[in-house]
Image: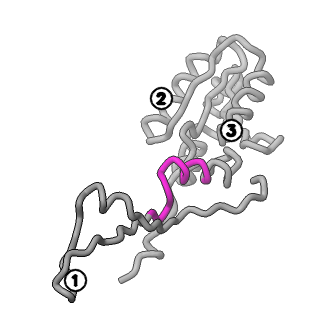
Amino acid sequence: AIGRDWQCGTLQVDYVLPERLDASYIGEDSNRHRPVMLHRAILGSFERFIGILIEQYAGKFPLWLAPTQVVVASIVSDAADYANEVAATLKAAGLQVETDTRSDKINAKIREHSLARVPVILVVGRREAEERKVAMRRLGGAAQEILSLDDAVAALVKEAQAPDISRFAKD
């Protein structure tokens, strides 16, 4: 995201730990020798890898990787029950969902959740509740798409599936 190259994997030579462990082996000359220990980390530390992943995506994770995948935000308090119903439906389908039914203005809610890098915001108001629809807004996009609740759930569940990595598996 900021043009920096990263090194993840490392191979380190350690002379200290074999000494501390009093490790030794018998060499071809029948004498004891101190081994040299090699430490290998394919991805570096777990923390470093996560940091690199966050930086690579600039915090804008794809839906399948995002810790919060969807926020359901109500426009008016009358739509709060429907927002909770939409969130429950998405949770039942296996998505990570939060609900925002605060009385704040919808633009403030959208700005807040966009800054938090939530990939999808579903906006619901009176009309959406009556028609059982949602207005879907994607992170980084200005347009919204009006979908039936069932269509939105189906599309999000499909998109939230992790990529198939079996093609990388070796026989």
Question: Given the image, on which type of amino acid does mark 2 rest?
Answer: Ala
Q: Determine the CA span between mark 3 and mark 2.
A: 21 Å
Q: Determine the CA span between mark 2 and mark 1.
A: 66 Å
Image: 160 above or below 42: above
Q: Which mark sits nearer the N-terminus, 2 or 1?
A: 1
Q: Mark 1 highlights which residue?
A: 27
Q: Secondary structure at mark 1?
A: loop
Q: Which mark is residue 117?
A: 3
Q: Residue at x 47, y 68 (%)?
A: 11
Q: Is residue 49 left or right of residue 113?
A: left
- Which region of the structure is painted magenta? 41-52
Q: Residue at x 50, y 61 (%)?
A: 43
Q: Which mark sits nearer the N-terminus, 3 or 2?
A: 2
Question: Given the image, on which type of amino acid does mark 3 rest?
Answer: Arg
Q: Is residue 44 magenta?
A: yes
Q: Determine the CA span between mark 3 and mark 1.
A: 58 Å
Q: Which mark is residue 88?
A: 2
